[in-house]
Image (cartoon, helix red, strand yellow):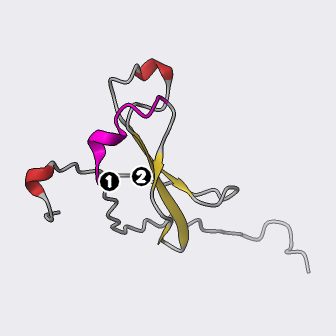
Amino acid sequence: MPSPVGSPTSCQSVTQTVNGPHSFTIKGYSLAKGMGIGKHIASESFTVGGYQWAIYFYPDGKNPEDNSTYVSVFVALAIEGTDVQGSLRAHTFGPERKGQA
């Protein structure tokens, strides 16, 4: 039944933040460097906040503008069509930090 004219209404929007760790180790990084701009190494999918995610690592950069000078790392939903945002905090370790995170 419609509410009478002038009756107060209300609604609420709740934005939730969920954090979840994931470790993605690339063994033989020096061999991956030089595989080509736009070519990536993908992690297996993992779940955070009820959504499937994957990490994409581009050893020579994702775009030609990167000129193989920079690496690119992205986190993305493994399933398209969902309006969710994600962020990534990455750490790199050389061989001297083997086994430490």
The residue drawn where x is 29% and y is 45% is: 29
Q: Which mark is residue 26?
A: 1
State the image quarter where residue 34 is shown.
top left
The residue segment tinted magenta is 27-37
Going from the N terminus, do you reach mark 1 or mark 2 first? 1
- Residue 31 at x, y = what percent? 32, 41
Q: CA distance from mark 1 to mark 2?
A: 20 Å
Using the image as rendered, state which of residue 81 and residue 98 is in the foreground.
98
- Residue 66 at x, y = what percent? 41, 22
Q: Nearer the viewer, mark 1 or mark 2?
A: 1
Q: Which mark is residue 67?
A: none
Instruction: From the image, tell me which residue sits under label 2.
Output: 87
Residue 96 magenta = no
- Residue 12 at x, y = what percent? 60, 68
Q: Is residue 12 above or below residue 55?
A: below
Q: What amino acid type is highlighted by mark number 2?
A: Ser
- Residue 58 at x, y = what percent? 42, 39
Using the image as rendered, state which of residue 57 and residue 20 is in the foreground.
57
The residue drawn where x is 70% and y is 56% is: 81
Task: Tell me the SS state at disc 2.
Answer: loop
The residue drawn where x is 91% and y is 81% is: 1
Task: Tell me the SS state at disc 1.
Answer: loop
Using the image as rendered, state which of residue 12 and residue 18 is in the foreground.
18
Q: What amino acid type is highlighted by mark number 1?
A: Ile
Residue 36 magenta = yes
- 32 vs 85, left or right, is left
Q: Residues within 10 Å of mark 2 (few under 14, many from 20)?
A: few
Q: Which quarter shows the C terminus?
A: bottom left
The residue drawn where x is 65% and y is 68% is: 11
Using the image as rendered, state which of residue 22 and residue 87 is in the foreground.
22
